[in-house]
Image (cartoon, rainbow, N blue to C red):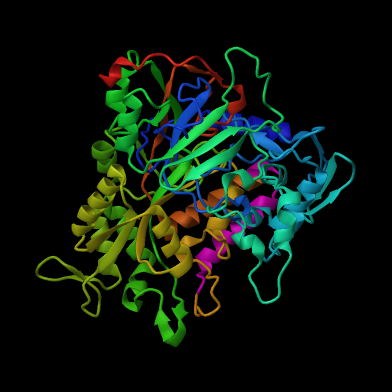
Amino acid sequence: MTKTLNNRWNQRRSLRWAALLAGAVILLVVGALLSLEPQRSPELAQRLTMSFPNEPKTFNVALNEESPNIFDGVTYAGLLRQDGLTGELLPNLAESWQVSEDGQQIIFTLRPAMQWSDGQPLTVDDVVFTFNDVCFNPAVPTLLRDSLRVGESGALPTVQKVGDRQVEIISPEPFAPLLRNMGGVPIMPRHALASALEPIDGQPLPFLSTWGTDTPAEQIVSSGPFRMVQYIPGQRLVFEQNPGYWAWNDAAASPQPVQEMVWQIVDSPDTALMRFRSGGLDVVGASASNFGLLKREESRGQFTIYNGGPALSTSYLMFNLNRGQRPAGRPLVNPVKSAWFNQKEFRQAIAHGIDRQTLINNIFQGLGTVQHASIALQSPFYLSPDDGLPTYDYDPDRGRALLESIGFTYDAAGQLRDADGNRVEFTLMHVAGSGTTDAIATQIQRDLGRLGIRVTLQALSFNAIVDRITLSLDWEAQILGTTNSLEPHFGISAWSPDGRLHDFNLRPDADDIIGREVADWEAEIGRLYVQASQATDFETRYQLYAEAQKLAQEYIPIIHLVNPLALVAVRDRIQGIQFSAIGQLLWNVHELRMLERSPDPEAAN
């Protein structure tokens, strides 16, 4: 069955490559670095310099809700890993695995003599701890749990040790993504974290504050290719090769593998580009605003622009549909606006009112395509418009007609008003500091102005937006993006009404918020995702995900914008790159080789 599905991945992914362009919306690791601390040689040839777009919010992988992050394929590893080019599953901490004929039992065999970054043995006990004590622990608010739930009941698999190097996973019901989802969970160190999971009377679980960003870097224990050795807030993260990771080749090989990585915290693509052109950086993201310049300098600048195909991400506009209330009856969203937002015709009108082709032509320099669905283009379960996915072409006349059909009218000044005479206006928050995102927000403001809607833009830091969405729930509309997977079930947290990423109608953690409502269509999409995860044959899964995508497009709680191209410029001294949107730059980091640094490129002049 696994071989058949891998063939499906390859057959369908070959149909999905389209011409697009990356903007600041792309959540890639991109370019800018400063020097390391004084005791480290600034001429170290095996140092890979990159950038990180936001301050990390946690060093605890179980509590992470960000992408990109310092964990995936960098400081943590799962039992399996994904081939960055094909999406096929490969051995990682597990050297082999056996799947039962019914697909409900997996036995993983771990590699022998593995170690954590602190030198402690990495064993089956760590695997059992990761699942039973962390992921399956209801006291731990982790996104990892959502993608492991099985069936309508949300039951979790059982995990037990069955040998010195063997661990058994059993699903209570058929669960198609069992191997991929369980194999991808980052394994956590029992010896370092078990004590933090012991409750203390009257106090929050210590685990919830363990390994915050104030924790000294050397205390963070890693299982992946690198371990963190320094974090200076607002400046940089420094990583060095983790000697305990199984995949590192002979350090005496020539050229040598990556020994250090530095991620400079840079929230401005323009600053990253400037530093890359000066010759001090190894990597920078190629975007609409800089692609032409980088292409002209590619040869003399001694770097190569890699095209990874359509980015494995979504960019979207979303309204807050939550009807919940805080104490004393204070609603999360102004009831007048909430009534607008919760009408599908209103959202459909907004979708028709956004000129996404002009977004592509003007902001993405003509190198992009309109995005229609949350499921990635490379996924074999993506439903294309040609196969029946509903779409929303730019048609402001259609948008106005939809609004008028539900009681909205236009006054003499062309302003849209609801049936009670209220002017239609809302605040749209977006990430500050990105020229591309700023331009997208400004065009949406202008486009919706043509529908008579007044949009007030609010630029906030990424972390501030996340806090608004997940903690205070105090927002009206947002422009944001998220990273996808080839396996649609990884998106269950966004589409299940109880999911921790169900942002358009998030179930609050706070007990004092009451009155949240879940629409029938909303619940149905969640059910379809569950049913698709339990279907054991490809065609049945495909049809269930197709129905879910159609329903999502009809009710359009997420208004998709532009699908960009994953493009990155990398110094030619870095060899062995197999860049793709699926794996991005670091999926085969242990295979990269570093030549000696060459003089500053002519592009710096």
Q: Nearer the viewer, residue 408 or 51?
A: 51
- The reply to whether residue 140 is in sight is no
Residue occupying the point 60% across, 12% down: 254
Main secondary structure of the magenta stretch: helix
Residue positioned most to the front? 39
Q: In which quarter of the image is the N terminus?
A: top right
The picture quadrant where one finds residue 425 is: bottom left
Residue 525 belongs to magenta span = yes
Q: Give the residues drawn in magenta, as a range.
A: 517-539
Residue 78 belongs to magenta span = no
Q: Position of residue 29 (x, y in %)?
A: 46, 36
Q: Tell me: residue 326, above or below residue 340.
A: below
Please give left or right for residue 509 compared with residue 180 in the image.
left
Residue occupying the point 50% across, 44% down: 231
Q: Nearer the viewer, residue 484 or 121?
A: 121
Q: Tell me: residue 76, above or below residue 527.
A: above
Residue positioned most to the bottom? 328
Residue positioned most to the left? 412
Q: Which of 547 and 303 is in front in this view?
A: 303
Q: Where is residue 11 in the image (x, y as percent from the top left)?
A: 58, 29
Please give left or right for residue 455 compared with residue 575 in the image.
left
Q: Where is residue 315 in the image (x, y as percent from the top left)?
A: 40, 47
- The reply to whether residue 421 is in sight is yes
Residue occupying the point 22% across, 53% down: 447
Please give left or right for residue 111 compared with residue 300 in the image.
right
The picture quadrant where one finds residue 79 is: top right
Q: Nearer the viewer, residue 293 or 378?
A: 293
Q: Where is residue 481 in the image (x, y as percent from the top left)?
A: 42, 49
Q: How many labels does the image show?
A: 0
